[in-house]
């Protein structure tokens, strides 16, 4: 188990690519990320993200000891998609709120 790294825009774009990150940021801004949770025991960040057809997609993200991202989603893309990016932006906001 590892703690989640402190997130920022640059890291998210580095992990996923700018276009995917931008689409994920739009989903986050639209309030489509729900049920955000971090399980310290498993080291997994999970969320439900409403897709284009409003059906909730399940996202699970883990990080290894080198902060390498492994993001999985139930969408057709399956991994490292805009839904993963949206979840990361939601967690980034959570981290910012904790710092205030």
Image (cartoon, helix red, strand yellow):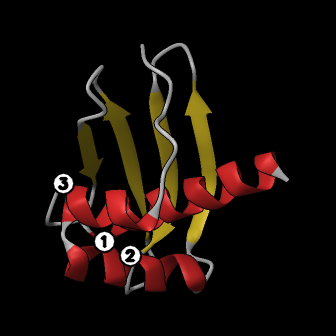
Find numbered disc 3 in the image and state the secondary structure of the residue it sits on: loop
Locate residue 58 relative to residue 4 in the image: left or right: left
- Tell me the quadrant of the picture where the N terminus can be found: top left
User: Which is nearer the eye, 67 or 36?
Assistant: 67
Residue at the (28%, 24%) spot, across then down:
64
Q: Could you say which disc has been placed on residue 79 in the image?
A: 3
x, y percent for residue 33: 56, 66
Residue at the (39%, 86%) spot, across then down:
53
Q: Which residue is mark 2?
A: 24
Verify CB contact (< 8 Å) between mark 3 and mark 2. Answer: no
Find numbered disc 1 in the image and state the secondary structure of the residue it sits on: helix
Number of on-image labels: 3
Does residue 7 show up? yes
Q: Quadrant of residue 81?
A: bottom left
Name the residue at the left extreme. Answer: 77
Earlier-in-chain disc, 3 versus 2: 2
Determine the CA span between mark 2 and mark 1. Answer: 4 Å
x, y percent for residue 98: 79, 46
Residue at the (51%, 57%) spot, across then down:
48
Verify CB contact (< 8 Å) between mark 2 and mark 1. Answer: yes
Determine the CA span between mark 3 and mark 2. Answer: 13 Å
User: Which is nearer the eye, 67 or 76?
Assistant: 67
Pair 3/2: label in front: 2
Q: Could you say which disc has been placed on residue 22 in the image?
A: none
Q: Is residue 39 above or below residue 35?
A: above
Q: Quadrant of residue 40?
A: top right
Q: Which residue is mark 1?
A: 82
Locate residue 43 relative to residue 34 in the image: left or right: left
């Amino acid at each position: 188990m590892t703690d989640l790294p402190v997130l920022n825009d640059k890291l998210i774009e580095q992990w996923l690519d700018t276009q995917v990150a931008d689409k994920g940021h739009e989903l986050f801004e639209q309030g489509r990320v729900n049920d955000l949770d971090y399980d310290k025991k498993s080291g997994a960040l999970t969320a439900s993200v409403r897709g284009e057809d409003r059906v909730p997609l399940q996202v699970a993200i883990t990080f290894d000891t080198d902060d390498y991202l492994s993001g999985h989603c139930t969408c057709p893309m399956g991994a490292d998609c805009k839904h993963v990016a949206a979840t990361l932006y939601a967690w980034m906001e959570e981290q910012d709120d904790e710092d205030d």
